[in-house]
Image (tube, rainbow, N blue to C red):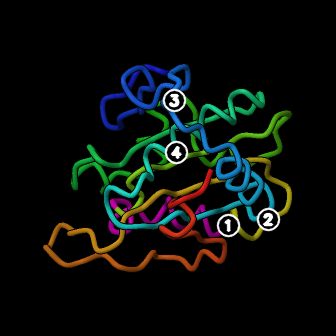
Amino acid sequence: DTTPGPTMTMINVGSDVRLDKTETVQRPRLVEHLARAAMESRVVLVRASRATGKTSTLQLLRDHLKQQQALVYTLTMLDVEHEEKQSSFNSLFETAYGVRWRTLFGEQQQPSFLLLDEGQMSYEGMPDFWNALKSRMQTERASTSVIIFAAYGDRGTEGLAQLATPLNIPCSFGADTLFFSR
């Protein structure tokens, strides 16, 4: 994995879900289902309450996609401060990965994925992310799929619950998808 940039945290699998442990349930049907949905719909939202397995599922999905030779960008919004959101998602992504995130929407040789954890933290103050996502949903050419893992009912900067995404994402999954599936 890539070394974290100063403003975004990369998820490190080293201390997270370990696929080499026999007790780790790898959930191949779930991760294949999410990967297929992302490739077909281009943008997918996985939304459930806290502690339902979203981050663990993201990690399993990331590893599955890498095994399939896909290019995977994994970011979490958890540590992004309010002031940093006021810059732009593009500059935060560029700091973390050395490329502008909108360039991922051009045609690429291999499938690529942006897996965004704690996506509810981007609902306010990141219009460039949501505008680019809207554009992404309307084009057939791009090979990058975006999967957003978000909690609902999260407390925003004003203490108000952030219940809705800034954009309607037709391909959405809830806690029922995460629970009791392999």
Q: Is residue 38 left or right of residue 90?
A: right
Q: Is residue 67 above or below residue 119?
A: above
Which residue is labeled 2 in the image? 139
Q: Label 2 near label 1: C-beta < 8 Å?
A: yes
Q: Dot 3 lies on which element? A: helix
Q: Closer to the observer: label 2 or label 4?
A: 4
Which residue is labeled 4 in the image? 58
Q: Amino acid at mark 2?
A: Thr
Q: Earlier in the sequence, mark 3 or mark 2?
A: 3
Kindly report the secondary structure that dominates the magenta region of the rendered protein.
helix
Q: Is residue 122 above or below residue 29?
A: below
Number of residues whose C-alpha sits closer than 10 Å to that of mark 4, classed few (under 14), some (14–19) or many (20 or more): many
Label 3 to label 1: alpha-carbon separation: 21 Å
Which residue is labeled 1 in the image? 135
Label 1 to label 2: alpha-carbon separation: 7 Å
Q: Quadrant of residue 157?
A: bottom left
Q: Position of residue 55 (x, y in %)?
A: 43, 46
The image's mark for residue 97 is 3
Q: Earlier in the sequence, mark 1 or mark 4?
A: 4
Q: Residue at x 58, y 33 (%)?
A: 99
Q: Dot 2 lies on which element? A: loop
Q: Residue at x 53, y 63 (%)?
A: 46
Q: Amino acid at mark 1?
A: Ser
Q: Label 4 near label 3: C-beta < 8 Å?
A: no
Q: Position of residue 27 (x, y in %)?
A: 62, 44
